Amino acid sequence: MSRLGTETAFLVLAKAKALESQGKKIVHLEIGEPDFDTPMNIKLAAKKAIDDNYTHYGPAPGLPPLREAIAKHISQTRGIEVMPDNVVVTPGGKPIMFYLIMATVDEGDEVIYPNPGFPIYESVIEFVGAKAVPLALKEENEFRVDVNDLKKLITKKTRLLILNSPQNPTGGILTQDDLKQIAKLAVENNLIVLADEIYSQIVYGDFKHYSIAAEPGMQERTIILDGFSKTFAMTGWRLGYGVMPTELVPLICQLEINSVSCTASFSQIAAVEALNGPWNEVHKMVDEFKKRRDVIVDGLNSIPGFKCHRPHGAFYVFPNIKGTGMSSRDLADFLLNEAGIACLSGTAFGKFGEGYLRFSYANSIPNIEWALDSIRKALKKR
């Protein structure tokens, strides 16, 4: 248990809620959760599913209609041929990370993961007794993977490579050329790749999401992680899935049976409606996120000591705060206590996050503008 980490966002949320209970106004920019409601057609599908008695156990890999819908969706959006037998449905996306690392990584193996990156990667790698090897994502490279840096980290012990695009916490996106070069290294070194694509549908402007699974020789060694939390504002529904080579499916299902048995049946029926129904609300949400991104990026860049890259995906900004003269943790604490802004220290995402903060712009523009003004005033007063 001493090797198992946590997700700092929930700890900061608890602190922020405690301050709110004392009457202090807090703007929540710490949690990676869309502030939109789940679309009505999905909610109605869930209610009907309950009335239709989808309230019992289902098969561990997921209900057949959902596995079919996911296979169709991934085939269309990633440009690869996926069958229902390649799909495992889980209660949220995290189980895919946990199960895959447990199923494929032995004690003493090395796993390369993005840093700054989602903290659960490093946590689970170390939990199973493997060596977590951080791959630095650099601001000057738009927080993309530097292929030369990756090449230097690969050894004979490297078993697994984790990629996340669009990326949490930076909003960086891997280009098709990046993926071609990374795929070449993966094939040459016989690496398994976990492609965390949970933000695949939240991309802005002319940028597109590409999957490494579509590169030559990669589908048979790639596990795609995706889900419904971010795209459809369904965080509380706990619905994720993995798309993987068929030989991995029984192993992942064995771990699922031993831990959670299966995913809630009525939620899965609602997920079928999410994929097959209208996507109007999703597109509206992404358009609104883009507006919020521009407001927060422009606002942060106007604050002395802040320098903020404009991200191309997800709903986070990762501003450089070195000009303030404060450490990431000290500034995050200062903003919470003095400005009423809940955000995360860059170090919550690994050692290469020092000098940065993460703000989630999954909040309204008026709240974001209030937060920016509050940050300016607090820093000026300091």
Image (cartoon, rainbow, N blue to C red):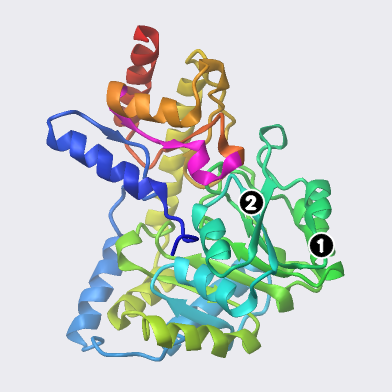
Up/down of 57 relative to 240, above or below: below
Residue type pointed to by label 2: Pro
Question: Few, some or many C-alpha atoms within 10 Å of disc 1 (few <14, some 14-19, many ≥20)?
Answer: few
Q: Which of marks 2 and 1 is nearer the N terminus?
A: 2
Q: Does the magenta run of residues contain 345?
A: yes
Which quarter shows the N terminus? bottom left
Magenta residues, start to end: 339-351
Disc number placed over residue 155 in the picture, else none = 1
Give x and y (percent) for residue 213.
70, 69
Vertical side of 97 occupied by 67: above or below:
below
| Towards the viewer: 2 or 184 | 2
For residue 36, side relative to residue 332 (left or right): left
In the picture, residue 108 is in which quadrant? bottom right
- 313 or 118: nearer the viewer: 118
Question: Where is mark 2, residue-wise?
Answer: 114
Give the side of residue 57 with respect to residue 166, left or right.
left
Q: In this view, does 265 lie to the left or right of 153?
A: left
Q: Residue furthest top?
A: 381
Q: Which residue is drawn at 51% across and 47% down?
A: 314
| Position of 241 relative to 64 (above/below) | above
Classify residue 206 by image quadrant: top right
Which residue type does callout 1 highlight?
Thr
- Where in the figure is residue 69, as x and y percent of width and height? 48, 79
The alpha-carbon separation of the residues under discs 2 and 1 comes to 17 Å
Which numbered circle lies on residue 207?
none
Circle 2/circle 1 CB separation < 8 Å:
no
* Left or right: where 283 falls relative to 10: right
- As drawn, which residue projects farthest toward the right? 188
**Rendered view: 83 above or below 147:** below
* Residue at figure coordinates x 40%, y 30% from the top left: 332
